[in-house]
Amino acid sequence: MSVIGKNTPRIDGPAKVSGKQQYASDIIIPGMMYAVTLRSPYPHAEILSIDTSEAEAMGAVCLTYEDIIPVIYNERSVSVPAATYRDRTVLPKKARHIGEPIAAVAADTEELAYKAMQALKVEYKVLDAVYEPEEAMKDGAPQLYDKIYFGDEEVIVKNNIGVVRNIDEGDSVGGFARADRIFEEDFELPRIYHCQLETKGCVAAPDTEGGITVWATAQSIHGNRQLLAQTLGLPLSKVNVKKITLGGGFGSSIQVNTVTPICAALAMKARRPVKLLSAREEDFYSHHKYPSKFHVRIGVTNDGVITAAHVKALIDFGAHQIQPMSFMGCVAGWFASLYKYEGNIKFDGVAVYTNKTPCCAMQGYGNPQINFAIESMVDIICNEMGFDPIQFRLKNYRGTGEEFWGQGPTIRSIIKSCGVEESLVEGSKLMEEWATRGKPEDKHGDILTGVGLARGFHCSGTAGPKEGEVIDYSSALVKVNEDGSIDCVTPVMDHGGGTWDALAKILTEVFKVPLNMVGLSPADTKNTGYDVCTHATRGVYCGGAAVYNAAVKCRDKLLEFAGRVMDEHPCHLEIVENEELGQGFIQVKGFPQKGRTIGEVAKIAQINSWGTAMYAESFRQKNCPPCFTTHFVKVAVNTRTGEITIPKVVIYGDCGVAMNPDLLYGQLIGSFNRGLGYVLYENLPHDERTGKLKNNGLLVDYKMPTAVEMPKAENVIVRHAHTYEPTGPFGAKGIGEAALASVQAAIANAIYNATGIRFTKLPITPEIMLKALQEKGLAHK
Amino acid sequence: MSKHDITLNVNGKKYELTVNSNELLLNVLRDKLFLTGSKYGCGIAECGACTILKDDESYFACMVPAVAADGWNITTVEGLADGDKLNPVQQAFIDNSAIQCGFCVPGMVVTSTALLRENPDPDEDFVKDYLRGNFCRCTGYVAMVKSVLDAASKMKEAK
Ligand code: FES
Ligand code: FES
């Protein structure tokens, strides 16, 4: 029985529930040293000198700017070098945000390392700092950088402007001129923190051949290897990064994590294995989601056609570039692909350096941000012009046959599967309160309820028919063992969404074997071809396609052997399922009378010295199909306290064929939970006097939703659309990042429906809600 | 720094150890006994990733000085199963697809085990409230809450 589309227990389930699953932080090597970093107490300071003598006298090994190879890099290597800005080194000469590592020490125990770190003597020249992008762009503002690099070119930084990206398509002037009404609004989304449960860490062990083996929190083992080889000055063949389970990523390990090259350099200097784990407080200062400000203009005709849209974006990306360039391209793409706008769009983006923690991808790479703006605008338009929100969306959305930007303007493909209509129509039936939601002015009482709708999407991978500014391919090796079981070696990572289960299922389907006959082998950068990264919701669609293509070619080889065994031409042979035999059965097409199991054929091939049926492949998809989501959310606003609760949600996901529906639903529900945090609680304000986070990096002062804030289980209604993606492995596309895209706007639109108050700035904390209710005269005492 | 000789009973095994007065139980479990199932997530009693049992009661191992645990009867996540036979909560987490990255899962199943020992017949609100000290960034909790309720009903049936 095929397991595709069926719920099967997670393969790594037993290891994870029994504490046996190993993560990078669990690696222990005999003779291992423990490392600690010294982090900048200043938001902006030149480092004049670091005296390590006292620490060294304590037996510690120290690493400062003097010890590193001053390679200037960008730790996120998924874009092509020619589209990548570079501005940083392993350790800096100048600290540009609080919590930036400026030196590191390793010692026999963690305690000794900590004491040695405290014994480092650093001379700083403290500089003025700047925290807000508007301030940073002013003449005379403190400058974070004089020069940086774009590809190989030197770039002089002016007014802290890191990246400018303008995109203009169609005729937006004409489009706006044709509109009957033009809507205009400002939106603001906060800086928040990934809070993946495993803090960033690394274990590095030098070998006797001058090389190094590394276990790190990583979404891409090859990305880590390439940067480590560069910063250690080693050939790639001397750097081995091991694939290991990641305790949550959400985008924060697409880039090589800051502690990883530090740990590797320390290990090479000490000639001993070193473990370097971030404390939570340090991790809090290491990676944030891009805070974003948008000005949005949309033109609409009286019959409900959007004729043009213009988005201006201002992005504060902090002290280093982890690719705000591609981030802004993506924001433009998500915006451009959500509706048709008659092809008339304009995007003007500016991304600015500030003395704050560097920002990076966090589930959606700008999609949740811009989706909040556009889907709020659509709600405003429908309310003001009296359009039905579902019909308006159906009239204007980009669906099958339309062009979709998978990763900014250079990567586009045509949509071939689309569950938007099903999701909107069926979703509205599942949320019974949708039809009776009424208008804000009809609502009374001290608890106001409302229902909101928003739709979103994300790409599945970043591979258009034409190669663009993002690298996208994966590798896999597949072989049939002599008992009919299957091995697969691939560097593709899984952050918990279930990518590895999906890969195993793809193999079962090609070879018609049960799930327990398939194994994913331990993998590292030495025994696998390149894989760009598990990001951009590409794990199943792109990584899975590499496994699929390697498997099919391996199967062809096996059928060739079978042809020799059975005296048939391989083109007449097929593999069918045989439950009794417990493995794939090769027969002449349609004739089950005579045949051989795949194991028998593999064994005969071995005994006759024909070889092993195996194939290694690196494969690039040629599409980046959108996976779609739709959220209907019911909210209840307490007009006495300002508290907002969610009694019910309907979530529709369209991922093509769902490899494992339960795991799909898990991602959709988990994303809803994170979206809830983004809309209602999370924010990382800085103290303008000190540059510190107001929560000081403490989890206790960073409110996130727990089990209690979720609706009752029976009121979390999750479905998936019945679609089949023709270019995906067995009809599959992605879901991961799409799952978050429309949560924010759906909740905000529901709050509007309940109260008549439109929030264009997040988060909407109880204090903010209460204040708005008071201003509107809706607050109850 | 004073040193102390302590005895820990962990997962049915007795360990005699010498520890510093500032050493934490979590570090002793992970770095000295190689029981790395208990995780570090915050170190300040905010995430529950380090949860262990002392007898039937759950504790954050990141908050317990090792010296204070002298003589304790400890169960870590590694000790919940009976050989390869998972305990009902562990099995329910698999059956209800409550696992994603899995980093919170050791703490979750330990806390949930304590929950069911304290209250074998909980309702949804009780479970949600009990799990409040255990943070999960991946799953959105719904499947975890279902798992605990499922384990409770399976345990009742088995009686
Ligand atoms: S590590 Fe102990 S509660 Fe977080
Ligand atoms: S499964 Fe990842 S934190 Fe819970």
Image (cartoon, coloured by chain):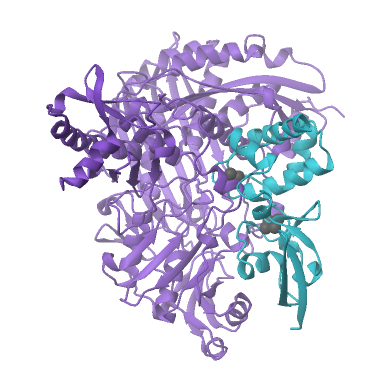
Q: Position of residue A516 (x, y in %)?
A: 44, 38
Quarter of image, res A167: top left
In-front residue for pair A584/A360: A584
Number of callouts: 0
Which part of the image, by quadrant, shows the C terminus of chain A? top right
Chain B image colour: cyan
Q: Position of residue A17 (x, y in %)?
A: 61, 46
In-front residue for pair A255/A175: A255
Ligand 1 quadrant in view: bottom right
Question: What residue do we see at 21% from left, 36% from top?
Answer: A558
Question: What residue do we see at 38% from left, 50% from top?
Answer: A521
- Location of residue A472 with respect to A157 vertically, above or below: above
The chain drawn in purple is: A
Report if residue A192 is visible in the image: no
- Location of residue A52 with respect to A485 vertically, above or below: below
In-front residue for pair B133/A376: B133
In-front residue for pair A589/A198: A589
Q: Position of residue A252 (x, y in %)?
A: 48, 51
Residue A170 is left or right of residue A44, and the answer is left
Q: Position of residue A400 (x, y in %)?
A: 34, 18
Quarter of image, res A602: top left
Report if residue B153 is visible in the image: yes
